[in-house]
Amino acid sequence: MPLNCLLVEIYIQSQWIRENAVKEVIEVGKNQKPNKFWEMKASADEKSADLFIYGAIISGYKWRDEDVTITEFRQALEDLPKTVKTLNMYVNSPGGSVFTTNAMINQLDRIKNRITINAYVDGIAASAASYLIMKADNIYMYENTFLMIHKPMITLWSANAVDCREQADWLDKIESKTCIPAYKDKGTDLLTDEKIAELLNGEDNWLDAEEAAELFNITILEEEKDAVACVDIELLNQYQNVPKHLFNAVQESVISAEEMALRQKIADDAKYSQEYTKTILGGI
Protein backbone atom coordinates (compact mmCIF):
# COMPACT_ATOMS: atom_id res chain seq x y z
CA MET A 1 0.00 0.00 0.00
CA PRO A 2 1.41 3.46 -0.94
CA LEU A 3 2.42 5.51 2.09
CA ASN A 4 0.16 8.47 1.22
CA CYS A 5 -2.86 6.15 0.99
CA LEU A 6 -1.90 4.58 4.31
CA LEU A 7 -1.73 8.00 6.01
CA VAL A 8 -5.14 8.93 4.61
CA GLU A 9 -6.58 5.67 5.91
CA ILE A 10 -5.09 6.25 9.37
CA TYR A 11 -6.46 9.83 9.47
CA ILE A 12 -9.96 8.66 8.46
CA GLN A 13 -9.87 5.95 11.08
CA SER A 14 -8.76 8.37 13.83
CA GLN A 15 -11.59 10.75 12.93
CA TRP A 16 -14.10 7.88 12.99
CA ILE A 17 -12.80 6.81 16.41
CA ARG A 18 -13.14 10.33 17.83
CA GLU A 19 -16.67 10.82 16.45
CA ASN A 20 -17.84 7.50 17.84
CA ALA A 21 -16.17 8.20 21.20
CA VAL A 22 -18.13 11.44 21.43
CA LYS A 23 -21.36 9.65 20.52
CA GLU A 24 -20.77 6.94 23.13
CA VAL A 25 -20.09 9.49 25.87
CA ILE A 26 -23.21 11.48 24.94
CA GLU A 27 -25.34 8.32 25.03
CA VAL A 28 -23.95 7.44 28.48
CA GLY A 29 -24.84 10.93 29.68
CA LYS A 30 -28.38 10.63 28.30
CA ASN A 31 -28.95 7.36 30.12
CA GLN A 32 -27.82 8.72 33.48
CA LYS A 33 -30.52 9.97 35.82
CA PRO A 34 -30.03 13.57 36.94
CA ASN A 35 -28.92 13.98 40.52
CA LYS A 36 -31.41 15.67 42.81
CA PHE A 37 -30.07 18.77 44.48
CA TRP A 38 -30.63 17.50 48.01
CA GLU A 39 -30.01 14.34 49.99
CA MET A 40 -31.12 13.59 53.53
CA LYS A 41 -30.20 10.77 55.88
CA ALA A 42 -30.33 10.10 59.60
CA SER A 43 -27.26 9.06 61.58
CA ALA A 44 -26.81 5.50 62.78
CA ASP A 45 -27.89 6.41 66.32
CA GLU A 46 -30.87 8.39 64.92
CA LYS A 47 -30.05 11.39 67.13
CA SER A 48 -29.04 13.65 64.22
CA ALA A 49 -29.55 13.87 60.48
CA ASP A 50 -27.59 15.33 57.56
CA LEU A 51 -29.15 17.37 54.75
CA PHE A 52 -26.91 18.02 51.74
CA ILE A 53 -27.98 20.80 49.35
CA TYR A 54 -25.47 20.58 46.53
CA GLY A 55 -26.22 22.17 43.18
CA ALA A 56 -28.95 24.42 41.82
CA ILE A 57 -32.25 24.46 43.69
CA ILE A 58 -34.54 23.30 40.91
CA SER A 59 -38.22 23.94 40.40
CA GLY A 60 -40.67 21.79 42.29
CA TYR A 61 -42.34 20.52 39.12
CA LYS A 62 -42.13 16.81 38.33
CA TRP A 63 -41.46 16.37 34.61
CA ARG A 64 -40.00 12.86 34.84
CA ASP A 65 -40.28 10.04 37.36
CA GLU A 66 -36.75 10.64 38.64
CA ASP A 67 -37.39 14.35 39.30
CA VAL A 68 -37.75 15.40 42.92
CA THR A 69 -40.59 17.62 44.07
CA ILE A 70 -40.95 19.73 47.20
CA THR A 71 -43.56 17.20 48.36
CA GLU A 72 -40.80 14.60 48.54
CA PHE A 73 -38.61 17.01 50.52
CA ARG A 74 -41.43 17.53 53.02
CA GLN A 75 -41.96 13.78 53.24
CA ALA A 76 -38.25 13.20 53.91
CA LEU A 77 -38.39 15.66 56.82
CA GLU A 78 -41.53 14.02 58.19
CA ASP A 79 -39.94 10.58 57.90
CA LEU A 80 -36.98 11.51 60.11
CA PRO A 81 -37.02 9.49 63.34
CA LYS A 82 -38.61 11.36 66.22
CA THR A 83 -35.36 10.86 68.14
CA VAL A 84 -33.52 13.23 65.74
CA LYS A 85 -32.76 16.46 67.58
CA THR A 86 -30.15 18.01 65.27
CA LEU A 87 -30.25 18.59 61.51
CA ASN A 88 -26.90 19.46 59.92
CA MET A 89 -27.49 21.24 56.60
CA TYR A 90 -24.48 21.29 54.24
CA VAL A 91 -24.81 23.81 51.42
CA ASN A 92 -22.88 24.31 48.19
CA SER A 93 -25.43 25.93 45.91
CA PRO A 94 -25.62 28.78 43.40
CA GLY A 95 -29.27 29.26 44.33
CA GLY A 96 -32.14 28.59 41.98
CA SER A 97 -35.92 28.54 42.15
CA VAL A 98 -37.40 31.18 44.46
CA PHE A 99 -40.63 29.16 44.65
CA THR A 100 -38.87 25.97 45.76
CA THR A 101 -36.59 27.77 48.22
CA ASN A 102 -39.56 29.44 49.92
CA ALA A 103 -41.33 26.11 50.19
CA MET A 104 -38.20 24.55 51.73
CA ILE A 105 -37.96 27.40 54.24
CA ASN A 106 -41.57 26.82 55.28
CA GLN A 107 -40.90 23.11 55.74
CA LEU A 108 -37.79 23.79 57.85
CA ASP A 109 -39.74 26.29 59.95
CA ARG A 110 -42.20 23.57 60.90
CA ILE A 111 -39.52 21.40 62.51
CA LYS A 112 -37.53 24.11 64.30
CA ASN A 113 -39.57 23.73 67.48
CA ARG A 114 -38.17 20.23 67.99
CA ILE A 115 -34.93 20.13 65.96
CA THR A 116 -31.84 22.37 66.07
CA ILE A 117 -30.68 23.26 62.55
CA ASN A 118 -27.00 23.89 61.84
CA ALA A 119 -26.04 25.25 58.40
CA TYR A 120 -22.55 24.73 56.98
CA VAL A 121 -21.49 26.59 53.83
CA ASP A 122 -19.28 24.04 52.09
CA GLY A 123 -18.61 26.15 48.99
CA ILE A 124 -21.00 28.94 48.12
CA ALA A 125 -24.46 29.90 49.28
CA ALA A 126 -25.58 32.24 46.53
CA SER A 127 -28.86 33.91 45.65
CA ALA A 128 -31.78 31.94 47.14
CA ALA A 129 -29.37 29.67 49.03
CA SER A 130 -28.07 32.72 50.92
CA TYR A 131 -31.38 33.35 52.65
CA LEU A 132 -32.20 29.64 52.95
CA ILE A 133 -29.30 29.17 55.38
CA MET A 134 -30.53 32.11 57.47
CA LYS A 135 -33.30 29.84 58.74
CA ALA A 136 -30.73 27.74 60.61
CA ASP A 137 -30.17 28.21 64.34
CA ASN A 138 -26.41 28.25 63.79
CA ILE A 139 -24.46 29.11 60.61
CA TYR A 140 -20.86 28.05 59.93
CA MET A 141 -18.60 29.08 57.05
CA TYR A 142 -15.18 27.73 56.12
CA GLU A 143 -12.45 30.29 55.47
CA ASN A 144 -12.57 29.92 51.68
CA THR A 145 -16.35 29.92 51.24
CA PHE A 146 -18.71 32.65 50.04
CA LEU A 147 -22.18 34.14 50.32
CA MET A 148 -23.72 35.96 47.39
CA ILE A 149 -26.71 38.22 47.99
CA HIS A 150 -28.84 39.98 45.39
CA LYS A 151 -32.45 40.83 44.63
CA PRO A 152 -34.75 37.82 44.03
CA MET A 153 -34.88 36.80 40.38
CA ILE A 154 -36.99 34.61 38.10
CA THR A 155 -36.86 33.76 34.40
CA LEU A 156 -39.88 34.69 32.30
CA TRP A 157 -40.69 32.96 29.01
CA SER A 158 -43.23 34.41 26.55
CA ALA A 159 -44.25 37.05 29.09
CA ASN A 160 -46.06 40.25 28.18
CA ALA A 161 -45.89 43.58 30.04
CA VAL A 162 -48.73 42.62 32.40
CA ASP A 163 -47.01 39.36 33.28
CA CYS A 164 -43.73 41.15 33.93
CA ARG A 165 -45.35 43.75 36.21
CA GLU A 166 -47.18 41.03 38.17
CA GLN A 167 -43.99 39.04 38.64
CA ALA A 168 -42.05 42.17 39.62
CA ASP A 169 -44.66 42.89 42.32
CA TRP A 170 -44.42 39.29 43.50
CA LEU A 171 -40.61 39.47 43.68
CA ASP A 172 -40.86 42.69 45.71
CA LYS A 173 -43.11 40.85 48.18
CA ILE A 174 -40.66 37.94 48.41
CA GLU A 175 -37.87 40.41 49.12
CA SER A 176 -39.77 42.34 51.81
CA LYS A 177 -41.61 39.42 53.44
CA THR A 178 -39.02 36.63 53.19
CA CYS A 179 -35.49 37.74 52.25
CA ILE A 180 -35.11 40.87 54.37
CA PRO A 181 -36.63 39.34 57.55
CA ALA A 182 -34.39 36.27 57.11
CA TYR A 183 -31.27 38.40 56.76
CA LYS A 184 -32.27 40.64 59.69
CA ASP A 185 -32.95 37.64 61.90
CA LYS A 186 -29.30 36.60 61.63
CA GLY A 187 -27.84 40.09 61.28
CA THR A 188 -25.32 41.79 63.55
CA ASP A 189 -25.50 45.44 64.56
CA LEU A 190 -23.62 46.28 61.35
CA LEU A 191 -26.49 44.99 59.21
CA THR A 192 -28.43 48.24 59.11
CA ASP A 193 -31.35 48.97 56.80
CA GLU A 194 -28.96 50.96 54.65
CA LYS A 195 -26.58 47.98 54.40
CA ILE A 196 -29.43 45.64 53.44
CA ALA A 197 -30.49 48.09 50.73
CA GLU A 198 -26.89 48.10 49.50
CA LEU A 199 -26.83 44.30 49.32
CA LEU A 200 -30.14 44.29 47.43
CA ASN A 201 -29.14 47.02 45.00
CA GLY A 202 -29.64 44.96 41.85
CA GLU A 203 -26.06 43.70 41.64
CA ASP A 204 -24.51 40.39 42.68
CA ASN A 205 -22.78 41.10 46.00
CA TRP A 206 -20.19 38.50 47.07
CA LEU A 207 -19.05 38.18 50.68
CA ASP A 208 -16.18 36.01 51.83
CA ALA A 209 -16.40 34.32 55.23
CA GLU A 210 -14.84 37.24 57.10
CA GLU A 211 -17.09 39.82 55.44
CA ALA A 212 -20.17 37.67 55.99
CA ALA A 213 -19.34 37.21 59.69
CA GLU A 214 -19.24 40.98 60.14
CA LEU A 215 -22.83 41.32 58.94
CA PHE A 216 -24.37 38.06 60.11
CA ASN A 217 -24.09 35.82 63.17
CA ILE A 218 -21.81 33.34 61.47
CA THR A 219 -19.04 31.25 63.00
CA ILE A 220 -15.93 30.90 60.84
CA LEU A 221 -14.33 27.46 60.84
CA GLU A 222 -10.56 27.81 60.58
CA GLU A 223 -10.03 25.39 57.74
CA GLU A 224 -10.65 25.32 54.01
CA LYS A 225 -13.16 23.21 52.12
CA ASP A 226 -12.39 21.45 48.83
CA ALA A 227 -16.06 21.65 47.84
CA VAL A 228 -15.50 25.25 46.70
CA ALA A 229 -13.92 23.87 43.53
CA CYS A 230 -17.04 21.78 42.80
CA VAL A 231 -19.29 24.73 42.01
CA ASP A 232 -20.96 24.49 38.58
CA ILE A 233 -18.92 26.86 36.42
CA GLU A 234 -21.76 27.36 33.92
CA LEU A 235 -24.03 28.64 36.67
CA LEU A 236 -21.21 30.73 38.10
CA ASN A 237 -20.81 32.39 34.71
CA GLN A 238 -24.36 33.73 34.96
CA TYR A 239 -23.43 35.96 37.91
CA GLN A 240 -21.66 39.31 38.04
CA ASN A 241 -18.70 40.35 40.16
CA VAL A 242 -17.59 36.78 40.91
CA PRO A 243 -14.37 36.99 42.98
CA LYS A 244 -11.48 36.19 40.66
CA HIS A 245 -9.84 33.68 43.00
CA LEU A 246 -13.16 31.80 43.36
CA PHE A 247 -13.69 31.70 39.61
CA ASN A 248 -10.11 30.61 38.97
CA ALA A 249 -10.30 27.83 41.57
CA VAL A 250 -13.43 26.43 39.94
CA GLN A 251 -12.16 26.87 36.38
CA GLU A 252 -8.88 25.10 37.08
CA SER A 253 -10.36 22.10 38.83
CA VAL A 254 -13.68 21.38 37.16
CA ILE A 255 -13.61 18.71 34.49
CA SER A 256 -16.98 17.15 33.79
CA ALA A 257 -17.47 13.40 34.02
CA GLU A 258 -18.37 13.39 30.31
CA GLU A 259 -15.18 15.23 29.36
CA MET A 260 -13.07 12.93 31.53
CA ALA A 261 -14.70 9.87 29.96
CA LEU A 262 -14.17 11.31 26.50
CA ARG A 263 -10.50 12.02 27.20
CA GLN A 264 -9.98 8.47 28.42
CA LYS A 265 -11.82 7.04 25.43
CA ILE A 266 -9.75 9.05 22.94
CA ALA A 267 -6.54 8.12 24.76
CA ASP A 268 -7.41 4.42 24.66
CA ASP A 269 -8.38 4.56 21.00
CA ALA A 270 -5.25 6.57 20.14
CA LYS A 271 -3.17 3.83 21.74
CA TYR A 272 -5.01 1.25 19.62
CA SER A 273 -4.45 3.34 16.46
CA GLN A 274 -0.75 3.53 17.26
CA GLU A 275 -0.53 -0.26 17.54
CA TYR A 276 -2.56 -0.60 14.32
CA THR A 277 -0.21 1.78 12.51
CA LYS A 278 2.84 -0.15 13.68
CA THR A 279 1.30 -3.38 12.40
CA ILE A 280 0.63 -1.92 8.94
CA LEU A 281 3.95 -0.12 8.63
CA GLY A 282 5.70 -3.24 9.75
CA GLY A 283 4.21 -5.09 6.81
CA ILE A 284 5.27 -2.61 4.13
Image: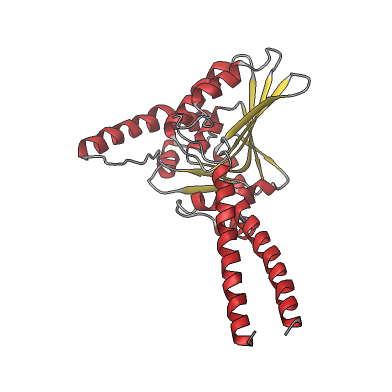
Specify whether 193 is left or right of 188.
left
Residue 92, position as x, y percentages in the image = 60, 41
Q: Report how many numbered discs are placed on residues in the image.
A: 0
Q: Quadrant of the N terminus?
A: bottom right
Residue 189 appears in view: yes
Residue at the top extreme, as displayed:
82
Specify whether 186 is left or right of 2.
left
Give the image quarter of residue 12.
bottom right
- The answer to which of 136 and 59 lies nearer the viewer is 59
Residue at screen point 55% across, 27% down:
135
- The answer to which of 43 and 196 lies nearer the viewer is 43
Residue 206, position as x, y percentages in the image = 51, 48
Residue at screen point 38% across, 30% down:
174
Give the image quarter of residue 175.
top left
Specify whether 183 is left or right of 217.
left
Specify whether 277 is left or right of 26.
right
- The answer to which of 260 and 267 lies nearer the viewer is 267
User: 239 above or below 163?
Assistant: below
Residue 161, position as x, y percentages in the image = 21, 40
Residue at the left extreme, as displayed:
161
User: 59 above or below 70?
Assistant: below
Residue at screen point 52% across, 40% down:
56
Give the image quarter of residue 45.
top right
Q: Quadrant of the C terminus?
A: bottom right
